[in-house]
Amino acid sequence: MTRKFIGPDPAQFSLFEAAAPAEAASAPAASPVEQVPQAPAAVVARAPDPTMFRHPQASREIRLDEHLVAYALKRARRRTIGFIVGVEGLSVNAPKWVGVADIESALREKGAWILRKLREQQERQQRLQQARVDWRDGTSVPFLGEPVIIVLDPRATGAVLNSDASALPGVPRLVLHVGLPHTAAPEQIRDAVQSWLQRQAKRVFEERCRHFAQQLGVRYTRLSLSSAQTRWGSASADGAIRLNWRLIHLAMPTIDYVVAHELAHLREMNHSPRFWDVVRSVMPDYERARGTLKDDVLPVFD
């Protein structure tokens, strides 16, 4: 199962050919247009401006709507003009024979799409910053969809989770006592919490795999944790299941969906309608849980 993290996830769009990667797939193709050649736009250093999007290797500028977009233009041996909206900003790859006027005409034609993708990347970066964990006493990380407060407690052995069933609304009810002194370095706190989360992941995943394997009438041969950057899980024809330990941050319905998805592959090693019928047989509302995989923000552990 492909994993979707909040992070570098460039949107791409290629003009004049049927290229349809990721989020750009729904953008309609444009036709080449002719325009009187314009003088190259100079890139001038400016103070940060909320209405400006600037690529660090920008060589040209164009105004789209009320926004100034400084983009990186690269000439390449290709047949089409390609747009890539990534973390750094807008990159344009164009054939050597296409004039600047045609490139900028195409940019204006797709201006709304480009600005939308630039805003999405900007929001993605903001969410990444907000998700970055400050490893100290009193910080929090999500566990099974709930925030867990990290408390450094030298009296604790390892890490001990306590819950307060009477916690007030809006107040985290889960507290993880980590057996470290208050002088512990951020890296020590991170490693201790990550180790605890991975142990919990193995425990929870094993229980859910047993549950759904019985319901689906399949037998898995082994379960292992993964730290993959691009996949939530995988299933092999020999019955081996791999699940990304970072799933432990998410709510149980989401975990159940990934587990059921991978175990369903032991009956249908494909994504045919029959496969989705197998998933639906144990999770009738799997579409809802599937959607949360795109929306949930994982904490950044670096």
Image: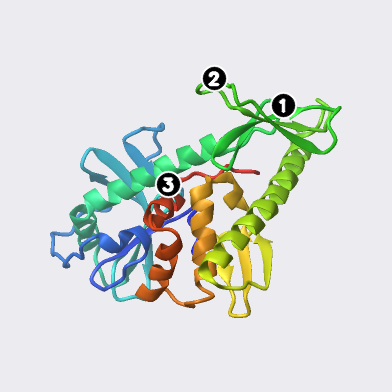
Q: Residue 226, position in %: x, y?
A: 65, 61
Q: Residue furthest bottom?
A: 237
The quarter of the picture where residue 275 lies is bottom left
**Circle 1 sits on which residue?**
137
Judging depth in this view, the residue of 46 and 142 nearest the camera is 142
Considering only order in the chain, which callout, 2 or 3, is on the residue closer to the N terminus? Answer: 2
Tell me if I can see residue 41 in this picture.
no
Considering only order in the chain, which callout, 1 or 3, is on the residue closer to the N terminus? Answer: 1
Judging depth in this view, the residue of 302 and 202 nearest the camera is 202
Q: Residues within 10 Å of mark 1 (few under 14, many from 20)?
A: many
Quarter of the image for the C terminus: give it.
Answer: top right
Q: Nearer the viewer, mark 2 or mark 1?
A: 2
Q: Residues within 10 Å of mark 2 (few under 14, many from 20)?
A: few
Q: Residues within 10 Å of mark 3 (few under 14, many from 20)?
A: few
**Label 3, label 2: how many angstroms apart (C-alpha)?**
26 Å
In the displayed structure, 38 sits above or below 76; it is above
Secondary structure state at the residue bearing disc 1: loop
The way the protein has been coloured in the rendering is: rainbow
The quarter of the picture where residue 176 lies is top right
Q: Residue 186, position in %: x, y?
A: 74, 35
Circle number at residue 168 = 2
Circle number at residue 295 = 3
Judging depth in this view, the residue of 262 and 280 nearest the camera is 280
Please name the amino acid that badge 3 sits on.
Answer: Asp
